[in-house]
Image (tube, rainbow, N blue to C red):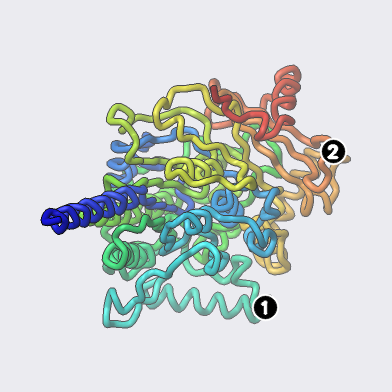
Amino acid sequence: MKYAPIILLLFIISSCQSQKENKKQVKQKPNILFIAIDDLRPELGTYGSKIAQSPNIDALANTGLQFNNAYCQEAICSPSRASLMTGARPESINVIENFTYFRDANPDIVTLPQQLWANGYETVHTGKIFHGKYNDPKLSWSRKPVPHSVLSGEKKPKFGFKLPENIKMQKENSAAMIAKYGKNALRNGLGKGPAYEFADYPDNTYEDGYNTDLAIATLKDMLRKNPDKPFFLGLGMKKPHLDWQAPKKYWDLYNEEDIKLAAQKNAPKDGATMGLHASFELRARADIPKKGGISDEQAIKLKHAYLACVSYIDAQIGRMLKALDESGQRDNTIIILWSDHGWHLGDMGIWGKATNYEIATRVPLIISAPSMSKNIRGTKTDALVELVDMYPTLCDLVDVAVPNTVEGQSFKPLLTNPKQDWKTAVFSQFPTPALREWAANPLSKGMKETSFGPLIEEVEAKIKKQQGDKWNRDLFENKLMGYSMRTKNYRFIVWKDYTNKNAEPIFIELYDHIKDPTETINIAKENPELVTKLLAQFNKGWKGNLAQLN
């Protein structure tokens, strides 16, 4: 009996140690840092850009796995983001333009952060993860970021233009368009200021810098309040989306003598006349010509502005990664960086996203995970993957079940063997770029009546000439969809009525990426047997082109 107190004490010590071990195991559940970038094509040093200064993203690639052939599901903000965040494709969730809220169309669908929240994660974001106001605040996010007062006792900065003349220009232009076309004029892209501005202001007086400060403070707050709870932290960069605004020091990083114009300035030979728009998004800016081409001199400055914004967001991502390092959580955090779509910088003679071609659909995608072996880190894979694959991959990596509504495929196996055979094709889509606004919605009255009217008439005439008897206004403006399939060697685009599943294609495009990587010549007409073969593959859909796992 005299040993009973000692035995009891040993039992208590053993129980405490066991509880500590259990807590330690819970804490080892990986965190996720989810870095989203708007309108960024793979114009980065790690992707081979000879001019882009992106040291922080390049460094991330050196510690992770870089995907050289990652593709969005639609080259416009809301459909792309709604698709990847729900894991379902644009038509499956009925979101093919920027003004349909995925939650209204799919009340019961489970988003990625919603699924993680249900499985023990703290989920929070700063900046742009979903599109605009469609950010699912009640169902996807377990908490809000820290309030502005945590960052500063001063008033929250106003984002956008800094120079008085540009603020005045945008205000006056906006007022004029609202007076003429109503409150939706601004939503439809009218009433803009200049395309770019670079003023001598601190990083955090612009939106992406501010949101990075907010994300860092929120990270610290989560770790202080509940250090054992895994987190999903979304950090969304709005640049390099127009308008191109950033501190002047990033503009000063570049010498315009080193900036090269797009190598391919013309539309694809024999390509679909409805496949390219008239650069509506850029031409909406006050300092851009409303007709005709963009001069070489102005094109250089526009590309300069885009590159400066790339360097600006790269610096913010660097600050976020440094904060993660300093928190002690880097070794227990999955980091995934992606862009919602690419962007034409004069390529094919146009400016903007919103096409079915390589330059608009191919995106940067980089992942670094604690489970990755040292020999995989810093490598690159040519496997075909899609943004819709991120949802199941992240769930797979943290051992969370994947909802049956998800239409992507986990690429976790590529993190151990990046060279293995993978998908035989990936898919994107976009409805009639030439006769829709860049948000993929039907043309508004304001678009038709302003300076865009003659541009629309010009491209419509080209479509009528090419399509002949197939021309039908209702079909081409409201029902025609371009479906793009990318295989290892080809891009194959099928134009058909998306409201009729049995509709025959009205036009087909075929580009040989071995001989013609910038898609300059549509070779469909000269290769009927190849078209038949690829059409059969296309008709198998995404399910018929998944990676075959042993």
Dividing the image into 4 quarters, which one contains the N terminus?
bottom left
Taking the view exactly as shown, the residue that stands out farthest to the top is 529
In the rendering, which numbered label is found on residue 502? 2
Relative side of 451 to 16, left or right: right
Relative side of 503 to 538, left or right: right
In the rendering, which numbered label is found on residue 158? none
Q: Quadrant of residue 202?
A: bottom left
Q: Residue at x 57, y 71 (%)?
A: 191
Q: Position of residue 333 (x, y in %)?
A: 33, 48
13, above or below 268, in the image: below
Q: Residue at x 58, y 57 (%)?
A: 78
Q: Secondary structure at mark 2?
A: loop
Q: Residue at x 31, y 51 (%)?
A: 22
- Amino acid at dot 1: Gly
133, above or below 510, in the image: below
368, above or below 104, in the image: above
Dot in front, 1 or 2? 2
Q: Is residue 392 visible?
A: yes
Q: CA distance from mark 1 to mark 2?
A: 39 Å
Q: Residue at x 68, y 76 (%)?
A: 181
